[in-house]
Amino acid sequence: MSKVDGVDKAVARTVQDYIDETPYWADGTLAPSSPMTAMQWRIWVLASAGKFFEGLVVFMTGVALPLIVREFGLGAFEKGAVSAASLFGILVGAFALGNLADHYGRKRMFIIEMVLFAICLIFLICSTNYTMLVIFLFGVGLALGCDYPTAHMIISESIPSIDRGRLVLSAFAFQAVGALFGTAIGYLILYKNPELGAWRWMYATAIIPAIFVVIGRFHIPDSGHWLVSKGRRKEAEDALMRLLYRKPKYPPFIKLAVPKTTDSNGDKVTPGTYLDLFRGKNIKATILASVPWFIQDLSTYGIGIFTPTILGSVIGATSVYPRNVADLIQNDMIAAKGAAFIDVLLIVGVICAVMLADKVGRIKLQVFGFIGCAAGLFLATLSMGAGPEMKIVYLFSGFMLFSFMTNIGPNAITYLIAGEVFPTKIRGKGAGFAASIAKIGAVITAFFFPFLLKDLGTEIILYFLVGCSLLGAVVTWFFRIETSGMNLEDLE
């Protein structure tokens, strides 16, 4: 007879009890883990796709931007707006749409966001003027912003607690894969099609994959946790049966406990609001989820989007003032190759985060990563006063260390923490709020970096980001809440 912590299966259990159920061998020996079902893996793949598209589009913009600027004749302000449009969309989407998953369900928003993404991409590549371009880049970001909390929740509420950190971070790793693909696709399209309109083909490469992801998202169950929180126990039982379907069939039936209607104080449980994020123990969770993520995005998106620009300005490998379109494309290709080389370290870093998050703990890894980011950026500043040969060594070494440390630490772990530290009824709001606060940092960076690089210079910007990284480590440690391996229902 199968048991969970000694409880007979005939007894009503919670959603997470069923998901976390660990099989026994014939002699009663506990197996080391809960086997994942085909549906759980399908959900993971479809959620990973959203992160891949984010990395693809945002980092591809770094390659497409010089072409867009030349085609539409953009000035510094317009260039900053194009750089920031998708990030501003992510900010608004995470805050305004992410919380809708708490009201309308994880699955419904999971589908809607990807439909919006595909539609906006189609209109983006057909843009004939600057205004259309900014509007549809914003729309793309809006969809990706909604995906921030939704993708995290749909994974974490569908898989065993013991695997949650590993699988959420594995999905997040596809942001780094997307970043590398975005830069590489940009380079290849420029190589095969060296003309100003090549940027349209770059964005077009994501349309067909996005349509397939939309179709796949229609064929998954909704979150049992969310359905139970809404008092829809029968629907939750049906959804859980689909999620945990195996051959031979197990569990043979599911009986969920009646959801609580009162809290620990005896008060009636009501739907969560944004004000709940700033009440009681949720204040600490809100600060931990939001502030380090904001600090992290200041540097990650600044370095990520403007790596080609910084490499060109410091190394001097490209023409500062391209004389014609051929010069512009040649400059763009050189910078894209350098950026792609550095982006590889993003993938290596997040792979290490996947392996270490549950063993070392979220907090220690995030603090370690922030300190490592500061070290990498400081190393890059040494290139400013160095000779020609050492300038390249310092700059590439610094950016490579930064890329590795940001994904082993804050870039990956802030995303993971934001989806774990809030109770179910406000998890979408909390994760969405944290993501939107983070993207304020990204938007500030994307919009103001062109001005700041010109007025202050690369060295001062890098020193500022060193300080930000050290501040992120301090805030993380002071407001720490460790969630490694904890049952989401225990975290309530």
Image: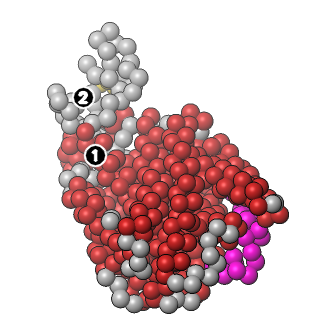
Type of amino acid at the residue the image marks with label 1: Arg
**What residue sits right under mark 2 in the picture?**
10
- Residue 454 drawn above or below residue 343: below
The CA span between labels 1 and 2 is: 29 Å
- Percent x, y of residue 463: 77, 64
Which of the image's four quarters has the N terminus?
A: top left
Which region shows up in magenta?
450-475
State whether the magenta stretch is mostly helix, strand or loop: helix
In this view, which residue lies farthest toward the right?
385
**What residue sits right under mark 1 in the picture?**
42
Q: Nearer the viewer, residue 407 or 26?
A: 407
- Percent x, y of residue 111: 27, 63
- Residue 358 drawn above or below residue 277: above
State the image quarter where residue 292 is shown. Answer: bottom right
Q: Nearer the viewer, residue 2 or 175?
A: 175
- Is residue 295 among the parts visible in the rendering? yes
